[in-house]
Amino acid sequence: MFPSPVRSSVPPSHVTASSVQGESTASSHVAPNEDSSKRDRSSSLSPPSSPRMGATQQQLLNMLPKKQKMDGPNHPEDLSKAKWDEMKEGINAELRQKVDDMFEYGCTIQMHTSSKDGKQTFLLKDGLERFNIENDATWHVPDNYDYKVSKTWGTGKDGQKLESIDKFNSGRSTSSLNAERLASATEGIKNGNLLDPIKVKKNSDGTFDIQDGNHRLQAAKDLGLEKIPYQEV
């Protein structure tokens, strides 16, 4: 009633050791293949770590846009006595003697190179202040802004208030202003120096009376600026 068992087509007498070995070898290959497929599936879930994938990732990174380098003002650098001795032959005699004397006194000397025209300025550093050795004037980092573009001057203060230049009342005639102070303010704006905002009192009509800053206001008018930085007092 039961079906007869399926017999091997190879008689038992023809089953050799080699055939048994071949079967065992073939069967032994099944497990590793299964294991390797599992490893392949599991490895696809883990982060790529092969050198080939690393190179691909690097190629993708290289395709990303690079951050643009922003040009800013050059800042003064300390000037060593050795470097000064190498370069001073090209400096005018009067300035050269001043710098030599300050090195003898043990002063801190700095050099600033303009980012616009490459002009070199030699400075005496005294605490937080710097002085132009050539003319003894207080010195500020230039090239912080371009007044021809901004139509105002920079103060370096966050949230600086600006107002139209025609809203400020000077209260002083141009002839009463100090020529040197006016020239200094004008030159400072031209050089892109950070200058303080003018101090004002606000009137009910929205105009401002200047308490401090008449020279800066006049310099702004002479240079064709449109906005004035101010601080109410």
Image (cartoon, rainbow, N blue to C red):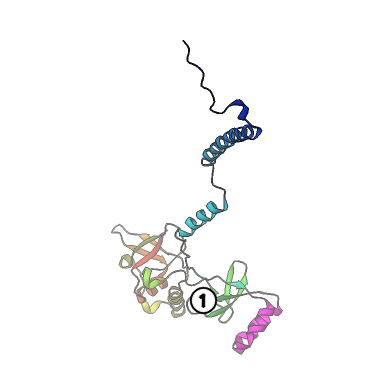
In the picture provided, is 97 more to the left or to the right than 5? right
Spot the residue most to the top.
Answer: 1
- Residue 74 at x, y percent in the picture: 53, 71
In the image, is residue 83 part of the stretch drawn in magenta?
A: yes
Q: Is residue 217 above or below residue 91?
A: above
Q: Quadrant of residue 219?
A: bottom left
Residue at figure coordinates x 36%, y 64% from the top left: 209
- Residue 157 at x, y percent in the picture: 46, 60
The foreground one among 72 and 153 is: 72
Disc 1 marks which residue?
Answer: 114
The foreground one among 103 and 68 is: 68
Q: Quadrant of residue 128?
A: bottom right
- Residue 26 at x, y percent in the picture: 59, 35
The foreground one among 92 and 114 is: 114
Judged from the image, the secondary structure of the residue bearing numbered disc 1 is loop
The foreground one among 120 and 159 is: 120
Residue at figure coordinates x 56%, y 28% from the top left: 10
* Amino acid type of the residue tagged 1 in the rendering: Ser
Report the label total: 1
Q: Quadrant of residue 150?
A: bottom left
Classified by dominant secondary structure, the portion drawn in magenta counts as: helix
Spot the residue most to the bottom.
Answer: 93
- Residue 51 at x, y percent in the picture: 57, 53
* 10 Å crowding of disc 1: few (<14), some (14-19), many (20+): some
* Image quadrant in which the C terminus is located: bottom left
Q: Is residue 8 above or below residue 222?
A: above
In the picture provided, is 61 more to the left or to the right than 82? left
In the image, is residue 106 part of the stretch drawn in magenta?
A: no
Task: Find the magenta span and give its range.
Answer: 79-105
